């Protein structure tokens, strides 16, 4: 009689341990997929913010080669957040056509005497990325 009851207790303990292990595994898997999605969005947002900084840097260099004022063509000192769209044909982000995305972009330009400080911010529902760069009038005419 004692042996039959000990087998039943061992089975119940084994089932409880197995259930706890499986529950923890399922919970970790769900967390893994959430973190994977967060990291994917953070990488995309970082590239989008870097692209904004590069566009301003490119404008400065273009001005130099066209013999214009180095800050010519820089837009207002601050833009509101702009929603980004993803064009399914070429898989590129833009502002005019495509499918809505979770990303919103904001560009701020602070003017100084011989420099501009640019801050590019990309937000999405679970995070944001902020990149800052200072550009100087590094070439003289």
Image (cartoon, helix red, strand yellow):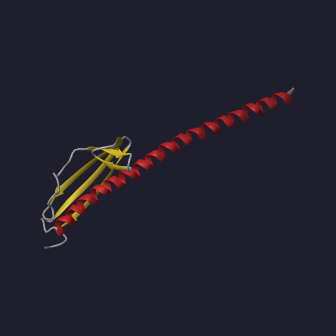
Q: Image check: 99 left or right of 8? A: left
Picture quadrant of residue 26: top right
Image location of residue 120, percent across then percent down: 27, 53
**Residue 63 vertical placement versus 126 (above, below):** below
Locate the N terminus and report the quarter of the image it occupies. Answer: top right
Q: Residue furthest front?
A: 89
33 sits left or right of 20 in the view = left
Percent across and percent down for residue 141 are 13, 73
Taking the spot 28% from the left edge, 55% from the top edge, the residue there is 52
Task: Kindly indicate the quadrant of the structure image that contains residue 19.
Answer: top right
Q: Is residue 5 above or below residue 56?
A: above
Taking the spot 30% from the left edge, 43% from the top edge, the residue there is: 97
- Residue furthest to the top: 1
The total of numbered circles placed on residues is 0
Q: Residue at 36% x, 40% y: name it.
A: 125
Q: Give residue 89's position: percent from left, percent from top.
A: 38, 47
Q: Residue furthest right?
A: 1
Residue 95, percent across and down?
28, 46
Q: Is residue 34 left or right of residue 2?
A: left
Left or right, residue 14 beside residue 37: right
Residue at 16 percent across and 67 percent down: it is 66
Asked if residue 19 is positioned above or below residue 47 in the image, the reply reads: above
């Amino acid at each position: 009689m004692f042996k039959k009851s000990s087998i039943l207790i061992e089975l119940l303990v084994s089932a409880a341990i197995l259930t706890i292990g499986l529950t923890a595994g399922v919970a970790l898997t769900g967390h893994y997929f959430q973190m994977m999605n967060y990291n994917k969005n953070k990488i995309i947002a970082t590239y989008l913010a870097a692209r904004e900084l590069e566009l301003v840097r490119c404008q400065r260099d273009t001005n130099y080669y066209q013999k214009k004022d180095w800050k010519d063509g820089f837009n207002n000192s601050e833009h509101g957040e702009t929603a980004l769209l993803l064009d399914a044909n070429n898989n590129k982000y833009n502002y005019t056509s495509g499918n809505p995305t979770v990303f919103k972009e904001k560009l701020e330009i602070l003017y100084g005497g011989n420099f501009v400080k640019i801050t590019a911010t990309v937000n999405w529902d679970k995070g944001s990325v902020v990149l800052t760069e200072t550009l100087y009038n590094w070439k003289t005419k």
